Amino acid sequence: MPVIKLTTMINAPIGICFDLARNIDMHKLSTEGTHEEAIAGTTSGLIGKGEHVTWKAKHFGITQHLTSKITEFEYPHYFRDEMLEGIFKMIIHDHTFEESGSITVMKDKFEFESPLGIIGQIINKVVLEKYLTRLLKKRNQMIQEVAESERWKAILNP
């Protein structure tokens, strides 16, 4: 099963970074190209432990639905979201936040498994790993840009 690991250094307080990473509206901003829309569960603002969200998005020209739930939560250092329903066989996304002076170190560990056995494994290596890494990097870059500016206030304090 593929595992994507990313580290993003953000010059902003840990609480702001943590809350932006779990903010539904921030997620929508960072995924404009796939027209992601929260259609059920927590559909705006902050999502917390035990809460779920269902996303509708278009990837590879196909409209998909994915429901994930926050299964672990330790403010402001860690949360995990896990896929409950969707096209994948499994998705587990760990979000970890550490302070290093005035810098927040945001780490992602994104594990996924496609259905379809060996065919799915080939698709993972040839297409999905690069595609999902690009989406996660774009999301993290947007979180960094918003956290390091005054824009976070409009998202976290609407």
Image: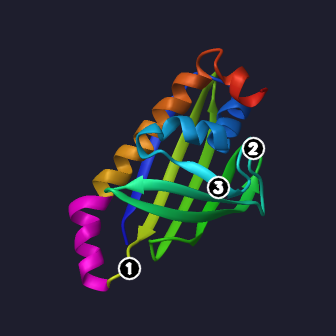
Q: Which residue is mark 2?
A: 46
* Residue range of the region highlighted in magenta in the rendering: 117-128
Q: Along the line of sight, which residue is nearer the eye, 52 or 101?
A: 52
Q: Earlier in the sequence, mark 2 or mark 1?
A: 2
- Tag 3's secondary structure? strand
Mark 2 vs mark 1, CA separation in Å: 30 Å
Q: Which residue is mark 1?
A: 115
Viewport quadrant of the N terminus: bottom left
x 74%, y 30%: residue:
156
Q: How far from the left and from the top, in percent, is residue 149?
A: 60, 15
Specify whether residue 125 is painted magenta: yes
Which secondary structure is most common in the magenta stretch? helix
Q: Is residue 105 left or right of residue 53?
A: left
Q: How far from the left and from the top, in percent, is residue 94?
A: 57, 56
From the viewer's perspective, is the residue at label 2 or at label 3 nearer? 3
- Mark 3 surroundings within 10 Å by alpha-carbon count, few (fewer than 14), some (14 through 19), many (20 or more): some
Q: Is residue 50 left or right of residue 99?
A: right
Q: Earlier in the sequence, mark 3 or mark 1?
A: 3
- Mark 2 surroundings within 10 Å by alpha-carbon count, few (fewer than 14), some (14 through 19), many (20 or more): some
